[in-house]
C-alpha cells in the first residue's frame, strides 16, 4: 500500500513528463506489493525504497528514459539472463511505458536484492 500522505517521492514524480511518471508509478506500486510496508526515501536525489535498514532499489527518469536501480551490480550479474532485452548500463536497468519491466522481473529484482543484502548482513 502506498503512503497516504504525499511524500518526497510524490514531489519527484510530479516533476516528470506524464509517460515517465506513469512508468515509474507502476513500478513503485509493484514494489509496495512485493515488500509490504517498504519505506520510501530520497537517496542520491532519486526515489528509493528501504526495508529493514536496507536500501533495496531506486527509480529515476532522465533524458535517456526511465531507470530501475538495484543499488548492487551483483543483482544485475546474477539476473543477466532475465535482463536480456533491457538496456543495462552502469548498474541501471532502462525501461519505458512502451517497454515496461514485467511484474515478475520487478519481483525477481527486488527479492534478489533483499536476499543478497540480508546475506551480507549475516556474513
Image (tube, rainbow, N blue to C red):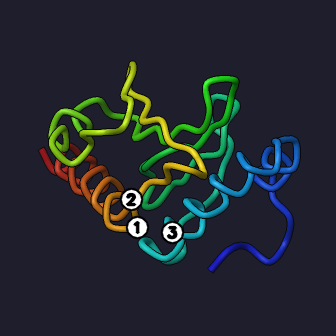
Mark 3 nearby-residue class (10 Å; few <14, some 14–19, many ≥20): some
Whole-Å distance between the Cαs marked 3 and 2? 7 Å
Which residue does the numbered mark 1 point to in the structure image? 103
Q: Residue at x 59, y 69 (%)?
A: 29
Q: Position of residue 36 (x, y in %)?
A: 49, 77
Q: Residue at x 67, y 60 (%)?
A: 25
Q: On the picture, is 14 further left or further right than 117? A: right
Circles 3 and 1: CB atoms closer than 8 Å: yes
In the depicted structure, whether residue 33 falls above or below residue 11: below
Kindly state the secondary structure of the residue where label 3 is placed. Answer: helix
Q: Residue at x 74, y 50 (%)?
A: 19
Kindly state the secondary structure of the residue where label 2 is placed. Answer: helix
Which residue does the numbered mark 3 point to in the structure image? 30
Circles 1 and 2: CB atoms closer than 8 Å: yes
Q: Residue furthest top?
A: 90
In the depicted structure, whether residue 67 falls above or below residue 64: below
Which residue does the numbered mark 2 point to in the structure image? 106
Q: Nearer the viewer, residue 53 or 14?
A: 14
Q: Nearer the viewer, residue 109 or 82?
A: 82
Q: On the picture, is 70 further left or further right than 7? A: left
Kindly state the secondary structure of the residue where label 1 is placed. Answer: helix
Q: Residue at x 71, y 57 (%)?
A: 22
Whole-Å distance between the Cαs marked 1 and 2? 5 Å
Q: Position of residue 31 (x, y in %)?
A: 49, 65
Circles 3 and 2: CB atoms closer than 8 Å: yes
Q: Position of residue 30 (x, y in %)?
A: 51, 69
Whole-Å distance between the Cαs marked 3 and 1? 7 Å
For the C terminus, which image quadrant? top left
Sequence-wise, the earlier of marks 3 and 2 is: 3
Q: On the picture, is 116 further left or further right than 11? A: left
Amino acid at each position: 500500500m502506498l503512503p497516504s500522505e504525499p511524500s518526497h517521492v510524490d514531489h519527484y514524480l510530479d516533476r516528470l513528463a506524464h509517460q515517465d511518471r506513469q512508468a515509474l508509478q507502476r513500478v513503485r506500486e509493484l514494489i509496495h506489493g512485493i515488500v509490504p510496508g517498504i519505506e520510501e526515501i530520497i537517496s542520491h536525489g532519486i526515489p528509493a525504497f528501504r526495508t529493514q535498514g536496507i536500501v533495496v532499489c531506486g527509480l529515476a527518469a532522465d533524458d535517456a528514459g526511465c531507470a530501475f536501480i538495484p543499488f548492487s551490480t551483483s543483482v544485475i550479474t546474477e539476473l543477466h539472463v532475465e535482463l536480456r532485452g533491457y538496456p543495462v548500463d552502469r548498474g541501471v536497468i532502462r525501461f519505458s511505458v512502451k517497454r515496461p519491466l514485467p511484474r515478475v522481473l520487478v519481483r525477481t529484482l527486488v527479492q534478489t536484492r533483499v536476499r543478497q543484502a540480508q546475506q551480507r548482513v549475516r556474513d
